[in-house]
Image: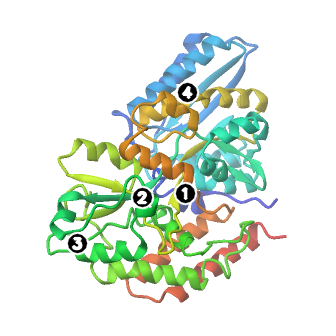
Amino acid sequence: MKRRLMSAILAVSMTASLAACASSGTPEGTTAGESQKSAGEAATTAAGDSSDAVEIKIWSPTDEVGIENWWTEKIAQWNSDHPEIQVTREAIDRADSYAYENKITTATTSNDLPDILFVDGPTVSYYAANQTIIPIDEVWSDEDKKDFMPSSVQQNTYDNHMYAIGPTESSVALYYNKDYLDAAGIPYPSDSNIEDAWTWTEFYENAKKLTTADYVGTNIIMDKGEGLIYALEPFFLENGASFVSEDGSKAEGYVNSDAMVETMNYLNKFIQEGIANIDPVKDEFLNGKAATMLGGSWNIADLEKSDLNWGVSYYPVSDDHKAVSPTGDWTAAVTKDCKNPEAAMEVLKWLFNTDNVAAYASAIAKPASRTSAYEKMEGWDNGVRALFLWQLQNTGVARPSTPSYSVLSQGFATAILNVFSGTEAKSELDTVAADFEEDYETYYGN
Protein backbone atom coordinates (compact mmCIF):
# COMPACT_ATOMS: atom_id res chain seq x y z
CA MET A 1 0.00 0.00 0.00
CA LYS A 2 1.36 3.38 -0.97
CA ARG A 3 1.84 5.65 2.00
CA ARG A 4 1.73 9.41 2.42
CA LEU A 5 1.96 12.05 5.10
CA MET A 6 -1.27 13.19 6.67
CA SER A 7 -0.95 16.86 7.56
CA ALA A 8 -2.43 18.89 4.71
CA ILE A 9 -5.13 16.49 3.65
CA LEU A 10 -6.20 15.33 7.10
CA ALA A 11 -6.60 18.90 8.21
CA VAL A 12 -9.56 19.34 5.92
CA SER A 13 -11.50 16.33 7.09
CA MET A 14 -10.96 17.34 10.69
CA THR A 15 -12.04 20.96 10.16
CA ALA A 16 -15.32 20.70 12.00
CA SER A 17 -14.83 17.47 13.85
CA LEU A 18 -18.36 18.28 14.51
CA ALA A 19 -19.23 16.60 16.71
CA ALA A 20 -20.11 15.61 14.79
CA CYS A 21 -19.16 15.83 16.01
CA ALA A 22 -19.02 18.86 18.25
CA SER A 23 -16.42 18.14 20.86
CA SER A 24 -16.94 20.54 23.73
CA GLY A 25 -14.62 23.08 25.21
CA THR A 26 -11.07 22.80 26.44
CA PRO A 27 -10.59 22.58 30.21
CA GLU A 28 -9.60 25.85 31.84
CA GLY A 29 -5.89 26.43 32.12
CA THR A 30 -4.81 24.69 28.91
CA THR A 31 -2.94 26.55 26.22
CA ALA A 32 -3.60 26.31 22.50
CA GLY A 33 -1.82 23.50 20.73
CA GLU A 34 -0.42 22.13 23.98
CA SER A 35 -0.31 18.41 24.65
CA GLN A 36 -1.24 17.52 28.19
CA LYS A 37 -1.23 14.74 30.72
CA SER A 38 -4.72 13.94 31.87
CA ALA A 39 -5.78 13.09 35.36
CA GLY A 40 -6.20 9.55 34.05
CA GLU A 41 -2.43 9.33 33.51
CA ALA A 42 -1.85 10.39 37.09
CA ALA A 43 -4.30 7.71 38.18
CA THR A 44 -2.11 5.14 36.43
CA THR A 45 0.89 6.11 38.52
CA ALA A 46 -1.21 5.90 41.66
CA ALA A 47 -2.30 2.39 40.71
CA GLY A 48 1.34 1.36 40.84
CA ASP A 49 2.88 0.01 37.65
CA SER A 50 5.06 -3.06 37.88
CA SER A 51 8.05 -3.55 35.63
CA ASP A 52 6.36 -6.58 34.10
CA ALA A 53 3.10 -4.83 33.25
CA VAL A 54 2.08 -4.25 29.65
CA GLU A 55 1.73 -0.51 29.10
CA ILE A 56 -1.08 0.77 26.88
CA LYS A 57 -1.14 4.44 25.96
CA ILE A 58 -4.21 6.24 24.61
CA TRP A 59 -4.38 9.52 22.72
CA SER A 60 -7.63 11.42 22.49
CA PRO A 61 -8.61 15.10 22.30
CA THR A 62 -9.35 17.04 25.46
CA ASP A 63 -13.03 17.43 26.11
CA GLU A 64 -15.43 18.88 28.64
CA VAL A 65 -14.98 18.21 32.34
CA GLY A 66 -17.55 15.41 32.44
CA ILE A 67 -15.60 13.32 29.96
CA GLU A 68 -12.24 14.10 31.54
CA ASN A 69 -13.70 12.81 34.81
CA TRP A 70 -14.96 9.69 33.01
CA TRP A 71 -11.46 8.98 31.75
CA THR A 72 -9.95 9.48 35.20
CA GLU A 73 -12.43 7.12 36.81
CA LYS A 74 -12.29 4.41 34.16
CA ILE A 75 -8.51 4.33 33.81
CA ALA A 76 -8.11 4.14 37.57
CA GLN A 77 -10.67 1.34 37.73
CA TRP A 78 -8.99 -0.64 34.94
CA ASN A 79 -5.50 -0.23 36.39
CA SER A 80 -6.66 -1.32 39.82
CA ASP A 81 -8.33 -4.44 38.42
CA HIS A 82 -5.62 -5.28 35.87
CA PRO A 83 -2.13 -4.86 37.30
CA GLU A 84 -0.79 -6.83 34.34
CA ILE A 85 -2.01 -4.17 31.83
CA GLN A 86 -1.56 -0.55 32.84
CA VAL A 87 -3.24 2.23 30.87
CA THR A 88 -2.27 5.88 30.48
CA ARG A 89 -3.97 8.56 28.42
CA GLU A 90 -2.62 11.73 26.87
CA ALA A 91 -5.33 14.32 26.37
CA ILE A 92 -4.36 16.64 23.54
CA ASP A 93 -5.75 20.15 23.15
CA ARG A 94 -7.36 20.81 19.77
CA ALA A 95 -7.96 24.53 20.34
CA ASP A 96 -4.93 25.52 18.27
CA SER A 97 -6.03 24.62 14.75
CA TYR A 98 -4.79 21.09 14.04
CA ALA A 99 -2.54 20.40 17.03
CA TYR A 100 -3.99 16.92 17.44
CA GLU A 101 -3.76 15.98 13.76
CA ASN A 102 -0.24 17.40 13.49
CA LYS A 103 0.85 15.32 16.47
CA ILE A 104 -0.51 12.21 14.75
CA THR A 105 1.37 13.11 11.56
CA THR A 106 4.65 13.52 13.41
CA ALA A 107 4.20 10.29 15.35
CA THR A 108 3.29 8.37 12.20
CA THR A 109 6.49 9.31 10.43
CA SER A 110 8.61 8.57 13.52
CA ASN A 111 6.81 5.28 14.32
CA ASP A 112 5.87 6.65 17.70
CA LEU A 113 2.08 6.40 17.71
CA PRO A 114 0.24 5.46 20.90
CA ASP A 115 -1.33 2.03 21.27
CA ILE A 116 -4.90 3.34 21.00
CA LEU A 117 -5.70 6.40 18.91
CA PHE A 118 -8.98 8.33 18.69
CA VAL A 119 -9.78 9.65 15.20
CA ASP A 120 -12.76 11.35 13.61
CA GLY A 121 -15.05 8.74 12.08
CA PRO A 122 -14.83 9.67 8.39
CA THR A 123 -11.03 9.33 8.46
CA VAL A 124 -11.05 5.67 9.54
CA SER A 125 -10.81 4.52 5.92
CA TYR A 126 -7.82 6.81 5.34
CA TYR A 127 -5.90 5.50 8.33
CA ALA A 128 -6.85 1.92 7.48
CA ALA A 129 -5.76 2.21 3.84
CA ASN A 130 -2.45 3.68 4.93
CA GLN A 131 -1.99 0.92 7.51
CA THR A 132 -1.76 3.43 10.34
CA ILE A 133 -4.34 1.40 12.25
CA ILE A 134 -4.95 -2.35 12.30
CA PRO A 135 -8.12 -4.49 12.06
CA ILE A 136 -9.90 -5.25 15.33
CA ASP A 137 -12.46 -7.74 13.99
CA GLU A 138 -11.95 -10.17 16.86
CA VAL A 139 -12.65 -7.67 19.65
CA TRP A 140 -16.43 -7.99 19.44
CA SER A 141 -18.57 -10.98 18.64
CA ASP A 142 -21.19 -10.84 15.92
CA GLU A 143 -23.78 -10.40 18.66
CA ASP A 144 -21.88 -7.44 20.10
CA LYS A 145 -21.62 -5.85 16.66
CA LYS A 146 -25.40 -6.10 16.32
CA ASP A 147 -25.66 -4.07 19.52
CA PHE A 148 -23.72 -1.18 17.99
CA MET A 149 -25.62 1.25 15.75
CA PRO A 150 -25.50 0.06 12.12
CA SER A 151 -24.00 3.41 11.14
CA SER A 152 -21.21 2.96 13.72
CA VAL A 153 -20.26 -0.38 12.22
CA GLN A 154 -20.49 1.12 8.72
CA GLN A 155 -18.32 4.10 9.64
CA ASN A 156 -15.63 1.96 11.23
CA THR A 157 -15.42 -0.74 8.57
CA TYR A 158 -13.02 -0.61 5.63
CA ASP A 159 -12.31 -3.32 3.08
CA ASN A 160 -14.60 -5.71 5.02
CA HIS A 161 -12.65 -5.29 8.27
CA MET A 162 -13.58 -3.37 11.40
CA TYR A 163 -10.81 -0.93 12.30
CA ALA A 164 -12.31 1.14 15.10
CA ILE A 165 -15.26 1.69 17.39
CA GLY A 166 -16.45 4.60 19.50
CA PRO A 167 -18.74 5.22 22.45
CA THR A 168 -21.05 7.81 20.91
CA GLU A 169 -22.91 8.77 17.74
CA SER A 170 -24.54 11.90 16.36
CA SER A 171 -27.53 12.80 14.24
CA VAL A 172 -29.24 15.78 12.63
CA ALA A 173 -32.94 16.59 12.62
CA LEU A 174 -35.26 19.51 11.84
CA TYR A 175 -35.72 21.93 14.72
CA TYR A 176 -38.53 24.47 14.47
CA ASN A 177 -39.74 27.57 16.33
CA LYS A 178 -43.31 26.84 17.36
CA ASP A 179 -44.23 30.51 17.69
CA TYR A 180 -43.09 31.25 14.13
CA LEU A 181 -44.95 28.26 12.71
CA ASP A 182 -48.09 29.31 14.62
CA ALA A 183 -47.84 32.85 13.23
CA ALA A 184 -47.54 31.47 9.69
CA GLY A 185 -50.40 29.01 10.16
CA ILE A 186 -48.14 26.01 9.51
CA PRO A 187 -48.88 22.78 11.43
CA TYR A 188 -45.98 21.29 13.34
CA PRO A 189 -44.19 18.47 11.53
CA SER A 190 -44.43 15.09 13.24
CA ASP A 191 -42.03 13.94 15.95
CA SER A 192 -43.46 10.42 16.14
CA ASN A 193 -44.23 9.25 12.60
CA ILE A 194 -41.69 9.43 9.80
CA GLU A 195 -44.52 9.20 7.30
CA ASP A 196 -45.60 12.68 8.42
CA ALA A 197 -42.15 14.27 8.21
CA TRP A 198 -41.76 17.26 5.92
CA THR A 199 -40.86 16.32 2.38
CA TRP A 200 -38.40 18.32 0.29
CA THR A 201 -41.28 20.25 -1.26
CA GLU A 202 -42.87 20.95 2.12
CA PHE A 203 -39.54 21.95 3.64
CA TYR A 204 -38.88 24.43 0.84
CA GLU A 205 -42.40 25.85 0.67
CA ASN A 206 -42.77 26.16 4.44
CA ALA A 207 -39.32 27.72 4.85
CA LYS A 208 -40.20 30.23 2.14
CA LYS A 209 -43.48 31.04 3.86
CA LEU A 210 -41.70 31.41 7.21
CA THR A 211 -39.11 33.89 5.89
CA THR A 212 -39.74 37.45 7.11
CA ALA A 213 -37.80 40.69 7.39
CA ASP A 214 -36.75 39.61 10.88
CA TYR A 215 -35.72 36.00 10.34
CA VAL A 216 -35.02 33.49 7.60
CA GLY A 217 -37.03 30.35 7.01
CA THR A 218 -34.25 27.92 7.83
CA ASN A 219 -30.61 27.40 8.71
CA ILE A 220 -28.97 24.71 6.57
CA ILE A 221 -25.28 25.59 6.98
CA MET A 222 -23.66 23.97 10.00
CA ASP A 223 -20.24 25.30 9.04
CA LYS A 224 -18.29 25.88 5.84
CA GLY A 225 -16.13 22.79 6.08
CA GLU A 226 -16.87 19.25 7.17
CA GLY A 227 -20.30 20.34 8.38
CA LEU A 228 -21.52 20.73 4.81
CA ILE A 229 -21.05 17.13 3.74
CA TYR A 230 -22.05 15.88 7.19
CA ALA A 231 -25.31 17.79 7.46
CA LEU A 232 -26.40 17.85 3.80
CA GLU A 233 -25.33 14.42 2.50
CA PRO A 234 -28.77 12.88 3.26
CA PHE A 235 -30.46 15.11 0.68
CA PHE A 236 -28.20 13.68 -2.01
CA LEU A 237 -28.67 10.09 -0.86
CA GLU A 238 -32.44 10.51 -0.66
CA ASN A 239 -32.35 11.59 -4.30
CA GLY A 240 -30.59 8.38 -5.32
CA ALA A 241 -27.11 9.90 -5.61
CA SER A 242 -23.82 8.48 -4.33
CA PHE A 243 -20.71 10.53 -3.67
CA VAL A 244 -18.36 7.69 -4.62
CA SER A 245 -18.52 4.11 -5.82
CA GLU A 246 -19.29 1.36 -3.32
CA ASP A 247 -15.63 0.40 -3.00
CA GLY A 248 -14.59 4.05 -2.52
CA SER A 249 -12.33 4.12 -5.56
CA LYS A 250 -14.31 6.25 -8.05
CA ALA A 251 -16.01 9.62 -7.95
CA GLU A 252 -16.42 10.24 -11.69
CA GLY A 253 -20.03 9.52 -12.57
CA TYR A 254 -21.01 9.57 -8.91
CA VAL A 255 -20.32 12.92 -7.22
CA ASN A 256 -21.02 14.71 -10.52
CA SER A 257 -24.08 12.67 -11.53
CA ASP A 258 -27.38 14.21 -12.62
CA ALA A 259 -28.90 13.36 -9.24
CA MET A 260 -26.10 15.20 -7.44
CA VAL A 261 -26.55 18.26 -9.66
CA GLU A 262 -30.31 18.21 -9.16
CA THR A 263 -29.91 18.05 -5.38
CA MET A 264 -27.32 20.81 -5.36
CA ASN A 265 -29.70 23.03 -7.31
CA TYR A 266 -32.53 22.26 -4.88
CA LEU A 267 -30.42 23.36 -1.92
CA ASN A 268 -29.22 26.41 -3.81
CA LYS A 269 -32.80 27.69 -4.03
CA PHE A 270 -32.79 28.27 -0.28
CA ILE A 271 -29.77 30.54 -0.58
CA GLN A 272 -30.63 32.33 -3.81
CA GLU A 273 -34.18 33.11 -2.67
CA GLY A 274 -33.10 34.39 0.73
CA ILE A 275 -34.74 31.53 2.61
CA ALA A 276 -31.42 30.60 4.25
CA ASN A 277 -28.19 32.52 4.79
CA ILE A 278 -24.85 31.49 3.34
CA ASP A 279 -23.34 33.36 6.31
CA PRO A 280 -25.67 32.63 9.24
CA VAL A 281 -25.32 34.72 12.38
CA LYS A 282 -24.01 32.86 15.42
CA ASP A 283 -26.65 30.60 16.99
CA GLU A 284 -29.12 31.77 14.37
CA PHE A 285 -31.97 29.47 15.40
CA LEU A 286 -31.36 29.78 19.14
CA ASN A 287 -31.44 33.58 18.83
CA GLY A 288 -34.69 33.65 16.89
CA LYS A 289 -33.12 34.61 13.57
CA ALA A 290 -34.17 31.40 11.79
CA ALA A 291 -37.58 29.74 11.94
CA THR A 292 -36.20 26.24 11.45
CA MET A 293 -32.78 24.59 11.54
CA LEU A 294 -31.05 21.43 10.46
CA GLY A 295 -29.37 20.93 13.81
CA GLY A 296 -27.50 18.24 15.65
CA SER A 297 -28.22 16.09 18.67
CA TRP A 298 -25.69 18.24 20.54
CA ASN A 299 -28.00 21.29 20.20
CA ILE A 300 -30.54 19.79 22.61
CA ALA A 301 -28.78 20.88 25.80
CA ASP A 302 -28.60 24.57 24.85
CA LEU A 303 -32.18 24.62 23.60
CA GLU A 304 -33.46 23.03 26.79
CA LYS A 305 -31.80 25.82 28.78
CA SER A 306 -33.30 28.54 26.56
CA ASP A 307 -36.69 30.29 26.60
CA LEU A 308 -37.29 29.39 22.95
CA ASN A 309 -40.59 27.65 22.21
CA TRP A 310 -39.16 24.92 20.01
CA GLY A 311 -39.89 21.47 18.67
CA VAL A 312 -38.13 18.86 16.58
CA SER A 313 -39.05 16.63 13.68
CA TYR A 314 -37.29 14.16 11.41
CA TYR A 315 -34.68 15.10 8.86
CA PRO A 316 -36.68 16.11 5.73
CA VAL A 317 -37.49 13.18 3.45
CA SER A 318 -37.64 13.04 -0.35
CA ASP A 319 -40.98 13.59 -2.00
CA ASP A 320 -41.29 9.82 -2.41
CA HIS A 321 -40.52 9.49 1.34
CA LYS A 322 -37.04 8.05 1.22
CA ALA A 323 -35.47 8.89 4.59
CA VAL A 324 -31.77 9.28 5.42
CA SER A 325 -30.09 11.05 8.36
CA PRO A 326 -26.46 11.94 9.20
CA THR A 327 -24.30 10.03 11.65
CA GLY A 328 -20.70 9.89 12.86
CA ASP A 329 -18.42 10.69 15.77
CA TRP A 330 -14.95 10.13 17.19
CA THR A 331 -13.80 6.55 17.37
CA ALA A 332 -10.90 4.52 18.79
CA ALA A 333 -8.44 2.32 16.89
CA VAL A 334 -5.33 0.26 17.61
CA THR A 335 -2.26 1.61 15.81
CA LYS A 336 0.49 -0.04 13.80
CA ASP A 337 3.03 0.88 16.49
CA CYS A 338 1.23 -0.98 19.26
CA LYS A 339 3.58 -3.66 20.61
CA ASN A 340 0.82 -5.55 22.42
CA PRO A 341 -2.30 -5.34 20.25
CA GLU A 342 -4.06 -8.12 22.14
CA ALA A 343 -3.79 -6.14 25.37
CA ALA A 344 -4.93 -2.95 23.62
CA MET A 345 -7.95 -4.77 22.25
CA GLU A 346 -8.84 -6.04 25.70
CA VAL A 347 -8.76 -2.45 26.94
CA LEU A 348 -11.00 -1.32 24.07
CA LYS A 349 -13.46 -4.13 24.71
CA TRP A 350 -13.79 -3.11 28.35
CA LEU A 351 -13.85 0.66 27.76
CA PHE A 352 -16.75 0.32 25.37
CA ASN A 353 -18.86 -2.26 27.15
CA THR A 354 -22.50 -1.36 27.74
CA ASP A 355 -22.03 0.21 31.18
CA ASN A 356 -19.05 2.33 30.19
CA VAL A 357 -20.65 3.51 26.94
CA ALA A 358 -23.77 4.53 28.84
CA ALA A 359 -21.69 6.49 31.34
CA TYR A 360 -19.63 8.13 28.58
CA ALA A 361 -22.66 9.12 26.50
CA SER A 362 -24.46 10.51 29.55
CA ALA A 363 -21.42 12.54 30.58
CA ILE A 364 -21.10 14.15 27.16
CA ALA A 365 -24.85 14.35 26.40
CA LYS A 366 -24.58 12.50 23.09
CA PRO A 367 -26.35 9.42 21.73
CA ALA A 368 -24.68 6.16 22.74
CA SER A 369 -23.25 3.89 20.05
CA ARG A 370 -24.68 0.75 21.71
CA THR A 371 -28.40 0.02 21.79
CA SER A 372 -28.13 -1.76 25.14
CA ALA A 373 -26.66 1.38 26.73
CA TYR A 374 -29.99 3.20 26.51
CA GLU A 375 -31.43 0.88 29.16
CA LYS A 376 -29.01 2.57 31.56
CA MET A 377 -29.54 6.15 30.33
CA GLU A 378 -32.33 8.54 31.22
CA GLY A 379 -34.39 10.63 28.82
CA TRP A 380 -33.99 8.62 25.63
CA ASP A 381 -37.36 6.85 25.67
CA ASN A 382 -39.47 9.88 24.71
CA GLY A 383 -39.34 13.38 23.28
CA VAL A 384 -36.54 14.84 21.18
CA ARG A 385 -33.93 12.29 22.26
CA ALA A 386 -36.18 9.40 21.29
CA LEU A 387 -36.50 10.88 17.80
CA PHE A 388 -32.73 11.10 17.40
CA LEU A 389 -32.36 7.54 18.65
CA TRP A 390 -34.99 6.34 16.17
CA GLN A 391 -33.13 8.00 13.33
CA LEU A 392 -29.84 6.41 14.35
CA GLN A 393 -31.46 2.99 14.44
CA ASN A 394 -33.51 3.32 11.26
CA THR A 395 -32.30 6.00 8.83
CA GLY A 396 -28.71 6.79 9.85
CA VAL A 397 -26.01 6.55 7.17
CA ALA A 398 -22.30 7.25 7.65
CA ARG A 399 -20.33 9.53 5.38
CA PRO A 400 -18.56 7.96 2.36
CA SER A 401 -15.89 5.37 3.12
CA THR A 402 -12.81 6.05 1.02
CA PRO A 403 -9.12 6.72 1.75
CA SER A 404 -9.49 9.89 -0.32
CA TYR A 405 -12.31 11.13 1.90
CA SER A 406 -10.60 14.36 2.93
CA VAL A 407 -10.13 15.38 -0.71
CA LEU A 408 -13.80 14.60 -1.33
CA SER A 409 -14.96 16.53 1.72
CA GLN A 410 -12.82 19.59 0.97
CA GLY A 411 -13.83 19.55 -2.67
CA PHE A 412 -17.52 19.20 -1.89
CA ALA A 413 -17.44 22.06 0.62
CA THR A 414 -15.74 24.31 -1.93
CA ALA A 415 -18.15 23.27 -4.67
CA ILE A 416 -21.36 23.83 -2.75
CA LEU A 417 -20.21 27.19 -1.41
CA ASN A 418 -19.26 28.24 -4.94
CA VAL A 419 -22.69 27.18 -6.19
CA PHE A 420 -24.32 29.11 -3.36
CA SER A 421 -22.26 32.10 -4.54
CA GLY A 422 -23.50 31.83 -8.11
CA THR A 423 -21.45 29.27 -10.07
CA GLU A 424 -22.84 26.30 -12.01
CA ALA A 425 -23.33 23.04 -10.14
CA LYS A 426 -22.19 20.57 -12.82
CA SER A 427 -18.83 22.23 -13.46
CA GLU A 428 -18.13 22.48 -9.73
CA LEU A 429 -18.91 18.81 -9.17
CA ASP A 430 -16.83 17.83 -12.19
CA THR A 431 -13.88 19.48 -10.45
CA VAL A 432 -14.59 17.50 -7.28
CA ALA A 433 -14.64 14.27 -9.29
CA ALA A 434 -11.40 15.08 -11.10
CA ASP A 435 -9.53 16.01 -7.92
CA PHE A 436 -10.73 12.86 -6.19
CA GLU A 437 -9.71 10.65 -9.11
CA GLU A 438 -6.24 12.19 -9.18
CA ASP A 439 -5.73 11.68 -5.45
CA TYR A 440 -7.02 8.12 -5.41
CA GLU A 441 -5.03 7.03 -8.44
CA THR A 442 -1.87 8.70 -7.17
CA TYR A 443 -1.91 7.13 -3.74
CA TYR A 444 -4.18 4.08 -3.86
CA GLY A 445 -4.49 2.96 -7.47
CA ASN A 446 -2.86 -0.22 -8.69
With 193 as the anchor, is 89 left or right in this view?
A: right
Closer to the camera in the image, 405 or 262:
262
User: What amino acid type should be assigned to the residue bearing mark 4?
Assistant: Asn
- Chain-order first, disc 2 or disc 1: 2
Query: Counting other residues with Cα less than 10 Å from the Cα at mark 3, is it few (<14), some (14-19), or many (20 or more)?
Result: many
Is the Cβ of the residue at disc 2 closer than 8 Å to that at disc 1?
A: yes
Residue at 72% x, 48% y is 132
Q: Which residue is mark 3?
A: 210
Q: Secondary structure at mark 1?
A: loop
- Chain-order first, disc 1 or disc 4: 4
- Rounded to the nearest angstrom, the CA distance separating label 4 from label 3 is 43 Å
Residue at 59% x, 47% y is 119
Query: Counting other residues with Cα less than 10 Å from the Cα at mark 1, is it few (<14), some (14-19), or many (20 or more)?
Result: many
Measured along the vertical axis of the image, is residue 297 above or below residue 349? below
- Rounded to the nearest angstrom, the CA distance separating label 2 from label 3 is 18 Å
Is the Cβ of the residue at disc 1 closer than 8 Å to that at disc 4?
A: no
Is the Cβ of the residue at disc 1 closer than 8 Å to that at disc 3?
A: no
Q: Which residue is mark 2?
A: 314
Give how far across and how far down residue 370 sits, in percent: 58, 37
Give how far across and how far down residue 24 sits, in percent: 39, 42
